[in-house]
């Protein structure tokens, strides 16, 4: 086995998991950009999307189940915002954050109640879950699709934000929340749209993630959610390209650790997760606002 | 106004107390057995199957005669959530509920975590399938009816060496999991003594991406992959091994003996071997009754993973219940301290073999079953019965 085919699977895994983190990270970064809120429930929305797919595909054909999963996930994201965040619009930011943590635990415990705490086997999606061989490395097709799909979705999102009216409203709201309200922007619909986009991407992310790693448990959203959040901070929270690049860097780095592990004498595989967070600390020490973060200037 | 409410409440409480005191003597004498098992978390699937065996045993023998009096046996189940932090409060609940003996837990980590609470409460515990030596070591209240990891690790190492002529083994364990790390360690030790090489890696809690671990196993040129993990991680490992076309066998300990593994491996090109306590078909009468019990109730069926395959842990749960009854009979009392004392001399012939405790409180066992997952039929096939001297 030559070096390339030996180590290609690590790169593939890194890029694919990075793409999945990216889709979740966008949800974090957009909500933060507009509301200055860290939406802790986002990772659990991702988990709920996975569970919905498990249950819906049991009774529906996959091509019907997938759009239904996406619609329901978006609806849940929208409802969470309306019920748990909107009434707290004027409250201190800390209260909204606590509300987000509450939603997160509520979703986890509901899932625990419904599933009985056991891992649910994610259905195999035809074509996407098929086995393929890339340059001698055997993997699932989803691994290869993920980065491309992620990039296409991000490009569409950037176009939406730069070219459309609602996108302009979003940019205005993230620049200055109160002034944009005075300018006649319907802030509630802007925020709802943000949550809808975030949940939509989380649903797509969950389809890709669980096709590869097929067990859905009530707490499965925590780790990808945390990594995606790190990615969003890493890239500069509020910045979409930053979140995407941050996610790819984290996904690739954690798999590079595993690759390096073959060549060192002692076992460093247990630093896989620690590494992502170490990287975050180092970046923040030198660039406190993240890779692409805006400089904060105090208004006089 | 307020006073009248208070008075009404005290009155109601007094009435309730009267009611309770007057009702209790009328009922049969009861003895409570605590079930300390995970119903959620990583080991939820296994914990539920073990609990099923205990409930079935209870339906077979709902009463026991202790010191000439007929006692009704009540079961008090708590969920330790497969989590060492939550385990202590689950254990405390059993102690404060006043159980006479505790059965469990599936998973050595939570057993060790809850052990001190049982010791402080003076309640003896019977480990059903917790195989880590630490569980019973250095205490007098924890017993167990299964074999231990040093034994199981050696059996697996010998099996890999003899049957697959394995030179290199890839050992994958979970960080912070006493069972996983322990069995991995004993396997490594035995395998290296046999002249093999071991490449070891660990994965963190909450990990679901096993791609690069499997790649590492392939790159290391492993002849066998040893992964003593929870069934949840196991399903993902099998999935990933199949996706990357792993041709070498996967071996694991007793946790993998579960229909979660069978379902994950079905129709996939993987070879899986496990060591376990019981092989379905070992006791036809028990199998039949157990299957009937599982199929009779949709909750039981769901708890068993959706089919009526009899898991080894279920059979062990069944044996544990009867071991506890034997202890009650020998003690002639339901006092936890007396039950604890009596347990040392209890012997019982269960469906999984003869049970008799040594000076650590461990059952003397010297053989394990090896079985393999049949990926076509989705059932376990018997391979051999292994013992070491």
Image (cartoon, rainbow, N blue to C red):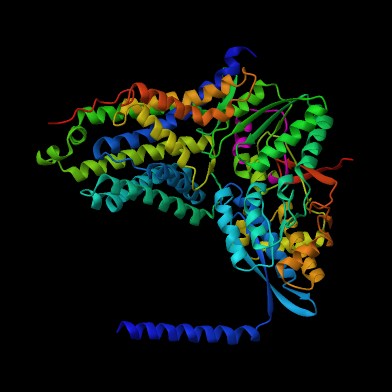
Could you tell me which quadrant the N terminus of chain B lies in? bottom left
* Residue A256, image x, y percentages: 53, 21
Residue farthest top in this picture: A2
Residue found at the very far left of the displayed protein: A183
Residue furthest to the right in view is B389
Quadrant in which the C terminus of chain B is drawn: top right
- Does A53 appear above or below B352? above
Q: Is residue B353 shown above or below A68?
A: below
In the rendered image, which quarter is residue B203 located in? top right
Snapshot quadrant of residue B68:
bottom right
Count every numbered label the image shows and give the total: 0
Q: Look at the image and give the residue range highlighted in magenta.
A: B235-255
The answer to whether residue B378 shows anywhere in this view is no
Picture residue at 54% right of the left edge, 23% below the top: A257
Could you say which is closer to the camera, residue B58 or residue B80?
B80
Q: Percent position (x, y) of residue B11? A: 44, 86
The answer to whether residue B311 is left or right of residue B24 is right
Q: Quadrant of residue B350?
A: bottom right
Classify residue A162 as left or right of residue B34. left
Q: Nearer the viewer, residue A248 or A55?
A: A248
Please say whether residue B342 is visible from this viewpoint. Answer: yes
Q: Position of residue A81 (x, y in %)?
A: 29, 48
Kindly identify the residue that appears in the image at 53 percent across and 25 percent down. Answer: A255
Inspect the magenta stretch and tell me whether residue B247 lies in it: yes
Is A21 included in the stretch rendered in magenta? no
Nearest to the observer: residue B140 or residue A11? B140
Where residue B347 appears, as percent x and y from the top left, is 85, 61
């Amino acid at each position: 086995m030559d070096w390339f085919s030996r180590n290609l699977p690590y790169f593939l895994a890194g890029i694919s998991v990075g793409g999945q983190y990216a889709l979740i990270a966008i949800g974090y970064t957009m909500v933060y950009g507009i509301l200055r809120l860290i939406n802790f429930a986002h990772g659990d929305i991702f988990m709920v999307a996975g569970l919905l797919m498990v249950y819906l595909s049991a009774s529906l054909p996959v091509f019907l189940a997938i759009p239904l999963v996406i619609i329901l996930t978006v609806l849940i994201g929208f409802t969470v915002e309306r019920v748990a965040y909107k009434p707290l619009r004027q409250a201190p930011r800390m209260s909204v954050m606590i509300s987000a943590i509450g939603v997160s635990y509520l979703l986890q415990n509901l899932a625990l109640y419904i599933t009985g705490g056991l891992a649910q086997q994610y259905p195999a999606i035809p074509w996407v879950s098929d086995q393929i061989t890339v340059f001698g490395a055997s993997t699932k097709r989803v691994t290869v699709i993920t980065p491309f799909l992620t990039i296409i979705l991000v490009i569409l999102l950037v176009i939406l934000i730069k070219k459309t009216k609602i996108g302009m409203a979003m940019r205005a709201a993230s620049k200055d929340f109160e002034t944009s309200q005075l300018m006649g922007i319907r802030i509630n619909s802007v925020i709802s749209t943000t949550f809808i986009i975030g949940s939509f991407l989380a649903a797509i992310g969950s389809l890709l993630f669980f096709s590869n790693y097929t067990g859905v448990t009530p707490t499965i959203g925590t780790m990808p959610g945390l990594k995606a959040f790190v990615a969003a901070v890493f890239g500069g929270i509020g910045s979409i390209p930053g979140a995407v690049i941050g996610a790819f860097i984290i996904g690739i780095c954690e798999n590079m650790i595993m690759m390096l592990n073959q060549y060192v004498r002692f076992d460093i595989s247990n630093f896989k997760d620690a590494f992502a967070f170490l990287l975050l600390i180092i970046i923040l020490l030198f660039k406190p606002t993240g890779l692409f973060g805006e400089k904060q200037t105090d208004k006089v | 106004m307020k006073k009248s409410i208070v008075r009404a409440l005290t009155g109601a409480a007094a009435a309730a107390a009267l009611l309770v005191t007057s009702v209790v003597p009328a009922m049969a004498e009861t003895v409570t057995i605590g079930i300390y098992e995970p119903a959620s978390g990583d080991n939820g699937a296994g914990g539920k199957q073990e609990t099923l065996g205990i409930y079935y045993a209870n339906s077979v023998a709902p009463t026991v005669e202790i010191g000439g009096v007929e006692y009704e046996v009540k079961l008090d189940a708590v969920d330790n959530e497969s989590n060492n932090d939550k385990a202590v409060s689950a254990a405390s609940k059993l102690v404060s509920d006043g159980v006479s003996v505790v059965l469990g837990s599936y998973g050595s980590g939570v057993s060790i975590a809850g052990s001190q609470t049982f010791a402080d409460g003076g309640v003896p515990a019977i480990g059903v399938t917790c195989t880590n030596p630490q569980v019973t070591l250095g205490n007098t209240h924890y017993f167990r009816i299964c074999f231990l990891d040093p034994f199981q690790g050696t059996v697996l190492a010998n099996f890999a060496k003899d049957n697959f002529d394995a030179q290199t083994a890839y050992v994958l364990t979970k960080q912070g999991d006493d069972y996983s790390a322990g069995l991995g360690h004993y396997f490594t030790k035995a395998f290296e003594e046999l002249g093999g090489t071991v490449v070891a890696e660990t994965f963190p809690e909450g990990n679901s991406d096993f791609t690069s671990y499997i790649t590492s196993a392939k790159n290391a040129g492993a002849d066998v992959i040893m992964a003593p993990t929870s069934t949840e991680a196991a399903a993902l490992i099998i999935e990933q091994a199949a996706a990357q076309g792993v041709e070498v066998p996967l071996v694991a300990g007793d946790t993998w003996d579960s229909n979660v593994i069978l379902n994950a491996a079905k129709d996939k090109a993987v070879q899986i071997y496990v060591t376990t306590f019981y092989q379905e078909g070992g006791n036809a009468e028990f199998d039949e009754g157990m299957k009937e019990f599982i199929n009779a109730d949709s909750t039981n069926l769901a708890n068993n993973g959706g089919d009526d395959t009899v898991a080894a842990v279920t059979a062990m749960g069944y044996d544990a219940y009867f071991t506890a009854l034997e202890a009650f009979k020998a003690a002639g009392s339901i006092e936890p301290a007396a039950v604890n004392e009596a347990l040392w001399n209890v012997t019982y012939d269960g469906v999984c073999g003869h049970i008799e405790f040594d000076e650590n409180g461990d059952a003397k066992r010297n053989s394990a079953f090896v079985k393999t997952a049949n990926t076509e039929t989705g059932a376990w096939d018997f391979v051999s019965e292994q013992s070491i001297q």
